[in-house]
Amino acid sequence: MEKTFIRLVIVVGLVFIGGACRQKTAPLTISQLVKTSEVKAYQGLFKITYPGKLQAASDVKLAFRVAGPIKDIYVQEGEYVRKGKLLARLDPRDYQLQYDAAQAEYIQVKGESERIMQLYQKKSIPVNEYDKAVAALKRVSALYNGQKNALEDTRLRAPFDGYIQKKYFDAYEIVNQGTPVLSMINNDYLEVSVDIPSVDYIRQEDFAEFYCVADVYPEDILPLEFLDITRKANFNQLFKARFRLKREQRQKLNLAAGMSVSVTIQYTPSAENLAIIPISALFWRDYRSYVWLFDENDGKVKMMPVEVKRVLKDGEVIVESDLRPGESIVSAGVNDLKEGQVVRVLPPVPPSNVGKLL
């Protein structure tokens, strides 16, 4: 019995000794391995390129201001015409008769009114007779000029230099007032419009230069003039910006409406808070983008908010933030880190390790 008690005491003692040893052993912690990159300074201009098509600066539909049967159309589709050229004509028969009647009445009333005015100057008739004569002359003059304009409106003339785009009617067909008969494009200027997103719309004050490159002339850079931009987005949340190809460039190359072009908008934003970082350094928390700023002194990481301004083609992004050139940020392994976590930086690959196989 006594031996059994002694054995029990020894076992209990060993248990306490083992527990004490385990409490003194420090837990093993391994810092997460990450890759870092250096923040680069932003320099240069933004260049944004959008697809577009050349279009006529003026593509108008021409119509008669009076109705009637078409007597002649003097032009063909694709024909170049000068401003003022007679393009088409209505049968003027009825309008000629109305004009002749109005002209005859005008001549008669005008002569009578002038005689009454002369008598009034001599104080031979009362003032009411004079007022009637003046009113009658004004009425008949308005009627005469209206019929004269209607007769002239039976002739359709070119409003500018350009090309006949389309014919909608032929001779002997009857058209109503305001019905398009021909369409015509202005060949002096060509325009191009592109759809831009809201991120570029809000920075339009920083627009500096504009140019386009036609697919058929890839070596020629064609300067553009900025015209306007819509104030309301379309269904796709895009804004339409219009540009005009300068006249000298239009005359230099054989460009035509419908040709495809690439329009480049170039602007200089404020580079004060802009930096370039790898796109792999970004992560998102609570609908915002962040990077991990690495402190080389204590090996800890800190969340730094950034605003992405432009994604570049080489896997980098331009961001606006408080980052400074030369600082180190985590560029691989960003999603599993926590604020203030100690990390280990992945050592650089030695030049002798070709292909990173070792």
Image (spheres, rainbow, N blue to C red):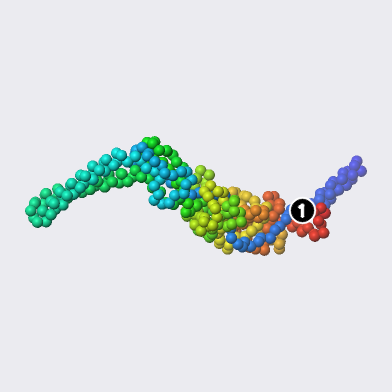
Which residue type does callout 1 highlight?
Ile
Q: Is residue 219 left or right of residue 81?
A: right
Q: Residue at x 36, y 45 (%)?
A: 155
Most distant residue in the top direction: 173
Which SS class for mark 1?
loop
Q: Residues within 10 Å of mark 1 (few under 14, many from 20)?
A: few
In percent of width and height, residue 178 lies at: 37, 41
Q: How many marks?
A: 1
Quarter of the figure that contains the N terminus: top right
In percent of width and height, residue 61 lies at: 42, 44
Q: Is residue 94 visible?
A: yes
Q: Is residue 84 left or right of residue 101?
A: right
Front-most of 215 and 71?
A: 71
Most distant residue in the left direction: 124
Q: Residue at x 49, y 57 (%)?
A: 247
Q: Residue at x 45, y 41 (%)?
A: 167
Q: Quadrant of residue 94?
A: top left
The residue carrying mark 1 is: 30
Most distant residue in the right direction: 3
Quarter of the figure that contains the C terminus: bottom right
Q: Is residue 319 left or right of residue 1?
A: left
Front-most of 143 and 14?
A: 143
In percent of width and height, residue 128 lies at: 11, 49
Q: Is residue 339 visible?
A: no
Q: Is residue 88 left or right of residue 222?
A: left
Front-most of 123 and 41?
A: 123
In percent of width and height, residue 3 lies at: 92, 43
Q: Residue at x 50, y 52 (%)?
A: 190
